[in-house]
Amino acid sequence: MPFQPVIVLVRPQLGENIGKAARAMLNFGLAEMRLVAPRDGWPNPSAGPAASGADIVLERAQVFDSLAEAVADCAHVYATTVRKRGVTKPVVTPEEAARAIVAEEGRSALVFGPERSGLETDDVALARTIVTVPINPEFGSLNLAQAVILCAYEWSKHQGCATALVQPTVEELLPPAPQEEFEGMFSQLCDLLEPRGYFQPPSRAEASRRTLRTMLTKPAWNHLEIRTLRGVLSTLRRTPGERP
């Protein structure tokens, strides 16, 4: 099984942003965070609330004095930056980086810079590859957690093991109602429309019924929806003020 990539935050400035990055990591199955010279020290009391339950990431976070030390055990280092900053290296998207990380032997690190300025040239020089997100050229500003979540999501899509993404639980859809229930509702509707002249002239009655039936069969109503519609029709049949 391939290693999970390490998320390295270089000189992060705010504890809240570290916490939000931890939350983004755990959303997509990543739990190893390394911090390089965090501005306000570590641990940071502001990180916990912002992590919204991703405490395991913060508890395991390791602190290093330099980026070189933080990635010393990593064979593949990816620097995330909008600009190349004068360093000539391969440039890939988060998706391309994720594919490579899954396929590569050895540990990989995804490196993110400080919130205000991003990675310095010397930081990028330590990496083998640059990761850049295709982005609006007129506004290329991502916050730290956004950058982390993009890379974590792409890795989770491609790593294909038991911790792969799953869709959040959704309400189970009811099957379409039996035809008998639909026919009862349709007959009830036609009985309401008939005395009001909807099917006039008689020469168009059959075509009107067919069109109405075709329209009403498209939604594939379930039995609760059919029951609700019949309740609506029963209400419309009553004269105003009449009790059910």
Image: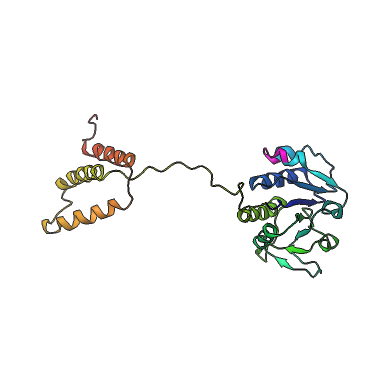
Residue 97 placement, left or right of 43: left
Q: Quadrant of the C terminus?
A: top left
Number of dots carrying numbers: 0
Magenta residues, as a range?
Answer: 51-56
Q: Can see residue 54?
A: yes
Q: Can see residue 46?
A: no
Color theme of the render:
rainbow
Q: Where does the image place residue 31, in percent across and percent down from the top left? A: 71, 45
Q: List the single residue furthest toward the top.
A: 243
Classify 184 as above or below 90. above
Q: Where does the image place residue 192, in percent across and percent down from the top left? A: 19, 44
Residue 116: image quadrant is bottom right
Classify 189 as above or below 135. above
Residue 89: image quadrant is bottom right
Between 145 and 75, which is closer to the camera in this rendering? 75
Which residue corresponds to the image point at 58% horizontal and 49% vertical from the top-left? 165
Residue 222 placement, left or right of 154: left
Between 43 and 15, which is closer to the camera in this rendering? 43
Q: Where does the image place residue 156, in percent across and percent down from the top left? A: 63, 52
Q: Does the magenta stretch include residue 197?
A: no
Between 20 and 91, which is closer to the camera in this rendering? 91
Q: List the single residue furthest toward the left.
A: 202
Q: Where does the image place residue 112, in percent across and percent down from the top left? A: 76, 55
Residue 27 placement, left or right of 57: left
Q: Is residue 55 magenta?
A: yes
